[in-house]
Image: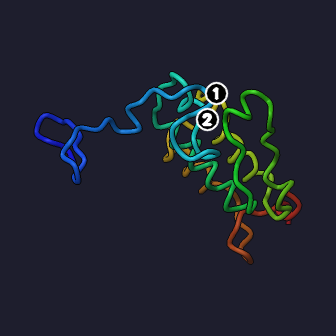
Amino acid sequence: MLDLKGKIWRSTSASPVKPTWARRPALSEGVGTPGYSPPEQFGLGVTDPRSDVYSLGATMYALLTGRPPPVAVDLMTEESKLGLPSSLNPEIPAAVDRVILRMMALQREQRFQSIAEARTVMLTLPLDRRKGRPAAASQRGR
């Protein structure tokens, strides 16, 4: 609960408590759900709309592959590698692979600048009219 001065209070004990997001995490700790948090949420980074782009890309990765995305710190330290989503689900077209990998780029400058920009690109992907999903490269020429 917040008081009029913006101080956070626990409702059960009426004592001030520092929220977990106000702590400065260690590089390996991060704030947020592992795998879905962008690299800038670890250590001293500053978040912006491109952080949300990363998280949405990680969510799409998980939904389309059935596997959780790798943790950003593991990707940064090369303990893990972000492979093509289609390597886990061959029905994912190459164009969708490219969108997800761009959304999950470790350098935020390489990501879409906003969710709106990512949406615009996704809406331009050619659809397989029979299945209502982006067409595979082999079907586009038909």
Query: Could you tell me which residue is drawn at 25 percent across and 47 percent down?
Result: 10
Amino acid on which disc 1 is placed: Gln
Q: Where is residue 49 in the image (x, y as percent from the top left)?
A: 46, 37
Amino acid on which disc 2 is placed: Arg
Residue 47 as seen in the image, left or right of residue 28: left
Badge 1 vs badge 2, beta-carbon distance below 8 Å: yes
Residue at the disc numbered 2: 111
Residue at the disc numbered 1: 107
Q: Where is residue 137 in the image (x, y as percent from the top left)?
A: 84, 57
Query: Could you tell me which residue is drawn at 80 percent across and 38 percent down?
Result: 80
In this view of the protein, which residue sits in the foreground, 74 or 47? 74
In this view of the protein, which residue sits in the foreground, 16 or 51? 16
Q: Position of residue 84 (x, y in %)?
A: 81, 48
Residue 40 as seen in the image, left or right of residue 94: left
Residue 111 as seen in the image, left or right of residue 131: left
Query: Could you tell me which residue is drawn at 74 percent across and 45 percent down?
Result: 98
Q: Quadrant of residue 136?
A: bottom right
Asked if residue 65 is positioned above or below residue 18 in the image, the reply reads below
